[in-house]
Image (cartoon, rainbow, N blue to C red):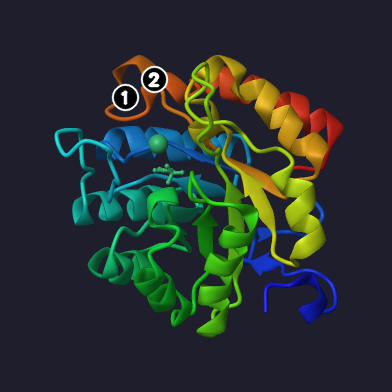
Amino acid sequence: LVNRKSINGNTIIDLGNVKIGQGYFTIIAGPCSVENKEIIEETAHFLSELNIKIMRGGVFKPRTSPYSFQGLGKKGLEYLKLAAEKYNLKVITEALDEDSLKMVNECADIIQIGSRNAQNFGLLKKAGKLNKPVLLKRGFMMTIEEFLYSAEYIVFEGNKNIILCERGIRTFETKTRNTLDISAIPVLKKETHLPIIIDPSHAAGRSDIIPDLIKASLAVGAHGIMVEIHPKPEKALSDGKQSLNFGKFKKIIDEIRNISKCF
Ligand code: PEP
Ligand code: MN
C-alpha cells in the first residue's frame, strides 16, 4: 500500500492552511519538550512571527533514562494546545503508548510515533485506526525496508495520512548522536508515495551542524524538516545541546527561504 506504484501521484497531507508533500518545503519547529506555559507560548509567538505553521513539543517523552525529565503529560498537552490556538498553529506531539495515543489524538493535528516505537506494531495498528495524520519516525536501528513495513502497518488499518521522518540511525560514528542517512530520502522517494521529512536535531545531537543539515535536507529533496528550538537551549530540560536558539534558527530559515519556497 505504501509502494509508489499503488497510487498515482503522491500522498499530500492536508492540514488546511498548510500541506506536507506538495512541492514546497514544510518547516516544523519547537522545543524537544513542553516545559511550561511561558516557554511554549513564547515559542508559538516566535514561530507565528516567522510565518511557520506547525509547532512541535513533546509531552510524553521517551527518555533513555527513567531519571530524566519525562514530560508534563496531559498538562503539557493543554499548554501546547493553548499556545497553538493563540497563534493559529498546528501541533505535532508524540504518543508513547495506547493511553497517550488517545489523548494526543484528541488534541494534536499530527500524531508523532517516535524512533523507539517505530516497530511497536500494536501501537502502529492503533494509530492506523485513527483519522489523523501520523508522523512516523525511522527507528534508529531500522533498515529502509523495515521502515516502510512499519508505515504499511498503519496504512493497512485504513489511515493513509502518513509522513515519514528520517532522524538518523545508529552507526559506529561518535561525533554525532546518530548518522543522518541522507540517502534514505531519494531512496524512499523512489519507493513510496508518502511524504518524507528530516529531523536534523536528533540525527546530529549538536546544534552547531544543524544549519548545514537543514541545507542538505532541502538539497536532497526532502519535503520538509522538523527542528528543535528553544529560547535558552542551555537551560532546556531535554535535548538542549541539539536545540537551536531563536536567532540561529531565524538565520537559517531566512537563508533557505531565499533559495526555495518554504512554509
Ligand atoms: C522527539 O522528536 O522528541 C524524539 C524523541 O525523537 P526520536 O523519536 O527521533 O528520538
Ligand atoms: Mn528531543
Q: Which residue position holds label 2?
A: 233
Q: Position of residue 110 (x, y in %)?
A: 49, 62
Q: Secondary structure at mark 1?
A: loop
Is residue 25 visible to the viewer in this orientation of the structure? Answer: no
- Pointer 1: residues within 10 angstroms few (<14), some, or many (20+)? some
- Cα distance in 3D space between marks 2 and 1: 5 Å
Q: Is residue 107 left or right of residue 261?
A: left
Q: Which image quadrant is residue 40 in? A: top left
Q: Which image quadrant is residue 113 in? A: bottom left
Is residue 147 visible to the viewer in this orientation of the structure? Answer: yes
Q: Residue at x 20, y 33 (%)?
A: 68
Q: Secondary structure at mark 2?
A: helix
Residue 180 is tagged as none
Does residue 159 sit above or below 74 in this rendering? below
Q: Position of residue 206 (x, y in %)?
A: 49, 20
Q: Is residue 104 left or right of residue 243?
A: left
Q: Position of residue 38 (x, y in %)?
A: 29, 34
**What amino acid is found at the position of numbered circle 2 in the picture?**
Pro
Q: Which image quadrant is residue 152 in? A: bottom right
Ligand 2 occupies quarter: top left
- Pointer 2: residues within 10 angstroms few (<14), some, or many (20+)? many
Q: Is mark 1 within 8 Å of ligand 2?
A: no
Q: Which of the two residues, 202 or 175, is positioned nearer the viewer here?
A: 175
Q: Which residue position holds label 1?
A: 236
Q: How many marks?
A: 2
The reply to whether dot 2 and dot 1 touch (C-beta < 8 Å) is yes
Does residue 210 sit above or below 161 in this rendering? above
Does residue 156 sit above or below 104 in this rendering? below
Question: Which image quarter holds the N terminus?
Answer: bottom right
